[in-house]
Image (cartoon, helix red, strand yellow):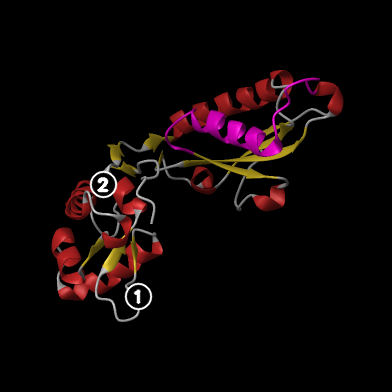
């Protein structure tokens, strides 16, 4: 198991995670990670009784909690005959989580408006990128009536940039172009979750098309 932790989680202050408030769940994850600090990957394991103690749950609550932690990739079930859970980098990311206030809907709309401007800029100016944006498609939580959001999912429907609009030299590869789009739109806000697709059928419903490229 690699020990390099992924990007830290962002927890929203008025949400519950694994049935707990965000401060409690982050503190529990910090206890778990402290126990395996400095251990090689093959020894980054913890007994179920200790994991239960660190999360402060009883034996009845432990079963559903362990199932949820496994479903989220925080722990891995012991091998056959094993008695300890493997602790993954996702648990380390949870221990380093930021706790933030939820995103007000008006702010989410402003971010979407900025994303539309950015999509137009990408198509107009990013001639080294072999990809361009065909449509910007907010989806998921943005389509709810919740006045406060815990994330802002943005779908980018991408297409190949026409040859006349590509640079003649130093054109990046399509994988690099996709990574550049994902990173740039992700920088709009820590709440943004970017999903790339080649058509609207690749974006989870419900969604809305906030911006569509001109074909001129």
Q: Position of residue 20 (x, y in %)?
A: 23, 56
The image quadrant that residue 77 belongs to is bottom left
Q: Quadrant of the C terminus?
A: top right
Q: Residue 157 falls in which quadrant of the image?
A: top right
Q: CA distance from mark 1 to mark 2?
A: 24 Å
Specify start and end residues of the magenta stretch as a single range.
166-192
Residue 210 makes an appearance in the image: no
Q: Residue at x 53, y 48 (%)?
A: 140
Secondary structure found at label 1: loop
Q: Is residue 143 visible?
A: yes
Callout in the foreground (1, 2): 1
Establish if 20 lies above or below 67: above
Residue at 78% x, 31% y is 161
Badge 1 crowding class, 10 Å Cα cut-off, few under 14, some 14 to 19, many 20 or more, is few
Horizontal relation, residue 85 to residue 27: left or right: right
Residue at the disc numbered 1: 79
Measured from the top left, where is residue 61 in percent x and y? 21, 71
Between 207 and 177, the residue placed more toward the observer is 177
* Position above or below: 139 against 36: above
Secondary element under disc 2, as helix, strand or loop, is helix
Q: Nearer the viewer, residue 142 or 95?
A: 95
Q: Which residue is mark 2?
A: 95
Within 10 Å of disc 2 (Cα), the crowding (few <14, some 14-19, many 20+) is: many
Q: Quadrant of the N terminus?
A: bottom left
Q: Is residue 208 left or right of residue 164?
A: left
Q: Is residue 16 magenta?
A: no
**22 lies above or below 152:** below
1 and 2 marks in contact (CB < 8 Å): no
Closer to us: 192 or 34: 34
Residue 148, position as x, y percentages in the image: 39, 40
């Amino acid at each position: 198991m690699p020990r390099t932790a992924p990007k830290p989680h962002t927890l929203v202050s008025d949400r519950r995670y694994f049935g707990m408030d965000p401060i409690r769940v982050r503190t529990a994850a910090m206890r778990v990670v402290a126990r395996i600090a400095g251990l090689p990957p093959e020894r980054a394991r913890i007994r179920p009784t200790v994991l239960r103690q660190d999360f402060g749950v009883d034996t009845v609550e432990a079963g559903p909690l362990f199932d949820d932690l496994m479903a989220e990739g925080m722990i891995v079930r012991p091998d056959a005959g094993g008695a300890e859970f493997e602790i993954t980098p996702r648990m380390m990311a949870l221990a380093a989580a930021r706790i933030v206030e939820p995103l007000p809907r008006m702010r989410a709309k402003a971010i979407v408006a900025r994303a539309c401007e950015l999509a137009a800029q990408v198509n107009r100016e990013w001639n080294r990128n072999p990809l361009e944006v065909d449509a910007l498609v907010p989806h998921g939580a943005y389509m709810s009536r919740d006045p406060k959001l815990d994330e802002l999912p943005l779908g980018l429907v991408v297409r190949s940039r026409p040859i006349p609009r590509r640079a003649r030299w130093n054109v990046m590869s399509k994988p690099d172009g996709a990574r550049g789009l994902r990173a740039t739109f992700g920088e709009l806000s820590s709440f943004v979750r970017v999903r790339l697709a080649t058509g609207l059928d690749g974006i989870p419903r419900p969604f809305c098309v906030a911006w569509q490229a001109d074909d001129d």
